[in-house]
Amino acid sequence: MFRETAAEPGTRSVPLAHLSVELGHLYMEDFEAGPERLRAHFAEVRPWVEAARTAATARSGGKRPRISTCFLIDDYFTRFSTPAEVVPMLLAEAERAGLTVDYLARESGCAVTGKIPVAEAVAARIVESPPPGSYGLRPPAAQTGWLANGERSPVARAPQAMKRAVPWQPPHETAARRHSVFLDVELWSDDADGQRLWSCPFLAAVWQLARLGLLRNEGEAVLVPQPHTPGGFPDRWDDLPTLLKLHDRADPFAAYRTCSVLPTRFLPVEHAVRVILDQVEVDPGALAQVADRSGKERMPVPDSVADRISYVYYSGP
């Protein structure tokens, strides 16, 4: 049985940093743009990483905070080039900007890690927040593959004889503040053969859960960093660990809070991530465990998982 974590004795705890800073994502179009694209990206990222470190230090009361950095490479939607070519270029451009990548992750690991269907298991833990007055008329996300943060517009139907047509009604955000910001998120799509393709927002939500240390399988951690061995990087993506620890002395991968520094094109995706996480049932024991550990360090975390995530967006490609 899959569990994000559990309150039962024997559930393995994971090391936790105070902050996980994501230095970016790499997709095929970024790689095709050459090292100049990465160079420009890391130049934009560096000052915000320093700001995140300063904020974490202030939150820790001036003590040295445990901070790790990570970078995500898309090998799920497209397989481009090879790790042997991509990773050294990525690390070199980060170093040129004065940044260190502690952990490197493959996006396909957010779908399946080893024999564990991670995305499928997280999808099974979605508990939708029914809008007031919906009475369960909307098909569940497990059936449709769509998840909303409120009530969709009613489906228009042709008027029957002697009956008026139902007037159009707008969608409504459940937690609206005066006005709605309604979002309907596609979680996956299935092809004609029934092969499932997980959406970018859903995999990004799984990625955030991993960075927050909330993924378990039968009590064991799902994404365990594997140490990088000398001798370069492999020629096949499948031969690269789904989560690679690049520096022995790096602080833990998972953390109480996360911060991602990304171009503005990711803003819609990350909005969708928050909608998803607000409706994923995280084990209460996990929340209690993290609350206890962070509380003992006098760095309490918000009750909401989504509120443990922060972002910095810069204007860029």
Image (cartoon, grey):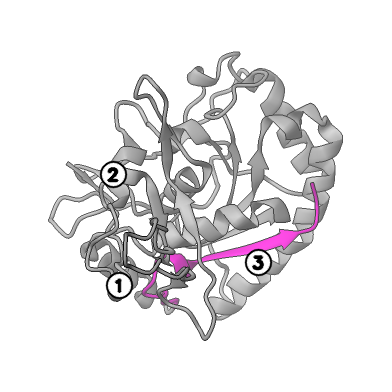
Q: Amino acid at mark 3?
A: Ala
Q: Which numbered disc flags the more N-terminal residue, 1 or 3? A: 3
Q: Which is nearer the eye, 31 or 294?
A: 31
Is there any visible trace of residue 263 in the rendered image? no
Disc 2: which residue: 143
x then y, percent, for residue 274: 47, 62
Q: Is residue 306 magenta?
A: yes
At x 26%, y 52%, the residue is 125
Contact between labelled residues 2 and 1, with CB atoms less than 8 Å apart: no
Q: Amino acid at mark 2?
A: Gln
Disc 3: which residue: 52
Q: Which numbered disc flags the more N-terminal residue, 1 or 2? A: 2
Q: Which numbered disc flags the more N-terminal residue, 3 or 2? A: 3
Above or below, comparing residue 128 to residue 209 in the picture: below
Disc 1: which residue: 292
x then y, percent, for residue 121: 28, 42
Position of 82 compared to 198: left or right? Answer: right
Q: Residues within 10 Å of mark 1 (few under 14, many from 20)?
A: some
Per the rendered image, the range of residues in magenta is 299-317
Q: Determine the secondary structure under disc 3.
A: helix
x then y, percent, for residue 113: 37, 31
At x 68%, y 53%, the residue is 262
Tell which tag, 3 or 2, sits nearer the viewer. Answer: 2
Is there any visible trace of residue 264 in the rendered image? yes
